[in-house]
Amino acid sequence: MTEKDTHSGFTDAEREAMRARAEEIRAEKEQGKGAKKRAADRKKLEELIASMPAPDRAAAARIHEIIGTVAPQLDPRTWYGMPAWALDGEVLCFFTHASKFEERYSSFGFNAPAQLDDGHMWATSFAVTEVDDEVADRIAALVYRALG
């Protein structure tokens, strides 16, 4: 794992994620809204997935396919340099690939707009080591539920 810079307190990977997010915000302002922006966002997400190492690439591609099937109303995009899917401009769910932060596993998570509420406590992020059929079904069900 990359050591934290003693001055900023952030790892190299964390600083890179913040730079990626700043670039995403600049691109959003330049492109405006509409079909062109959605197409550019989708292309950027698919290029990001294609650039990942094999295990992460396979999981991210499968998740992207699942979300496209279960929730075509979600817009694929990048978020902090990671694959994400947004509803009405807000990121609903995202995939953090293990290689990005030199982690033991990738994760699939949800942000506040996801309607996963279950009593006073519920999971919003899930470790993912492989997306087999059982995991694919669980992801599909979670995304469907997150939409309300």
Image (spheres, helix red, strand yellow):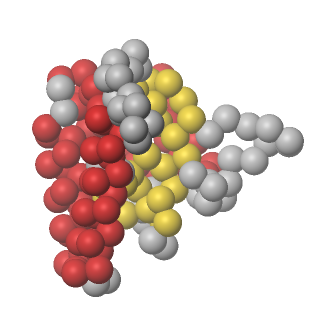
Horizontal side of residue 124 vs 2, given as left or right = right
**Which quadrant, please, contains the C terminus?**
bottom right
Residue 146: % across, % down: 61, 52
* Residue 119, visible in the rendered structure: yes
The residue sitting at 18% across, 26% down in the picture is: 53
**Which quadrant, please, contains the N terminus?**
top left
* Residue 35, visible in the rendered structure: no
| Closer to the camera in the image, 16 or 103 | 16
The residue sitting at 37% across, 64% down in the picture is: 75
Residue 69: % across, % down: 38, 51
Residue 21: % across, % down: 33, 57
| Closer to the camera in the image, 43 or 99 | 99
Residue 8: % across, % down: 40, 41
| Closer to the camera in the image, 52 or 142 | 52
The residue sitting at 47% across, 59% down in the picture is: 91
Quarter-wise, where is residue 20 in the image? bottom left
